[in-house]
Each structure stands twice: as structure tokens, then as C-alpha cells.
Amino acid sequence: MDKITTIEFHDKDLLGSINIHGQNLKETIAIEEMSELIKEICKDQRGELRRDNLVEEFADVMICMRMLSLIHDIKPEEVQRWIDNKVARQKRRDLEYIRNKLRRYEDDR
């Protein structure tokens, strides 16, 4: 369950699009797509989730992230190292949160 299913991004096509439209436009589009995903998440928070829209915006952001990784020569190993570090940090924070919650519960008894 730790491994994500492989997703094909069709790098040749993405690189072609970057070459045609340029880095600046692709970075601007990435920002716009992230904003659209944020909008869908906000709709979910309001109970107005449209799952297909959310998944579509998620896919758009993933494509943009792949384009950004190609533009900036970011290697999957680099990203994985940061993911591993950040997930480990989150796990430590979660455990500390649970410990503090238990302490408060015991103190209140």
C-alpha cells in the first residue's frame, strides 16, 4: 500500500508543449490549475463536492507538477527524499499530538 500505482505523464508530449508555449506560460497555468483544485476542495468543505470535478482538477495539477519537474529538472528521487522526510515528521507530530491529548484526558479525570 506504500507504493503508488504508476501514472504515465507522456513526458515527450509535455516537453513539446513546454517548448511550444514556454516555461513562463506553463508556470502561470500551474498556478491557475492549483487555484482551481483549491476551489474544488473548498466546495467539498461546504458540502458541495462534485467528485468528477475534483478528480479532474487533481489530474490537471498532477500534470502541471510533472511539467514543473521537467522545467526545473527535479528528479523523482529528490522528491521522494523530501516526501519521506516530511511524512516521518508528520508521523512524529501526530504521535506528539496523541500523547498530549492523552495527558490532558488523564489530567481531567
Image: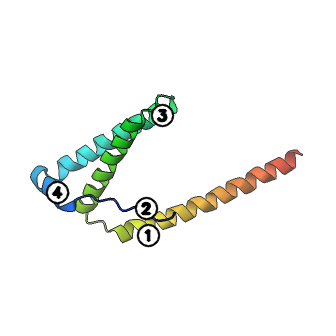
Query: Which residue is pictured at 19% across the width and 56% down the height?
Result: 14
Image x and y of residue 85, in percent: 50, 66
Q: How far is mark 3 from mark 2, CA to CA?
A: 24 Å
**Tag on residue 4?**
2
Query: Quadrant location of residue 34?
Result: top left
Image x and y of residue 58, in percent: 37, 45
Q: Nearer the viewer, mark 1 or mark 3?
A: 3
* Of the image marks 2 and 1, the number of the one nearer the N terminus: 2
Query: Please, what is the three-letter code of the amino acid marked with disc 2?
Result: Ile
In the depicted structure, whether residue 12 falls above or below residue 77: above
Q: How far is mark 1 from mark 4, CA to CA?
A: 27 Å
Q: How far is mark 4 from mark 2, CA to CA?
A: 23 Å
Query: Which residue is pictured at 46% across the width and 32% down the height?
Result: 49
In the depicted structure, whether residue 81 falls above or below residue 40: below
Asked which secondary structure carries label 1, the reply is: helix
Residue under label 3: 44
* Of the image marks 3 and 4, the number of the one nearer the N terminus: 4
Asked which secondary structure carries label 3, the reply is: helix
Query: Which residue is pictured at 31% across the width and 54% down the height?
Result: 65
**Tag on residue 13?**
4
Image x and y of residue 105, in percent: 82, 47
Query: Quadrant location of residue 13?
Result: bottom left
Residue under label 1: 81
* Of the image marks 1 and 3, the number of the one nearer the N terminus: 3
Q: Residues within 10 Å of mark 2 (few under 14, many from 20)?
A: few
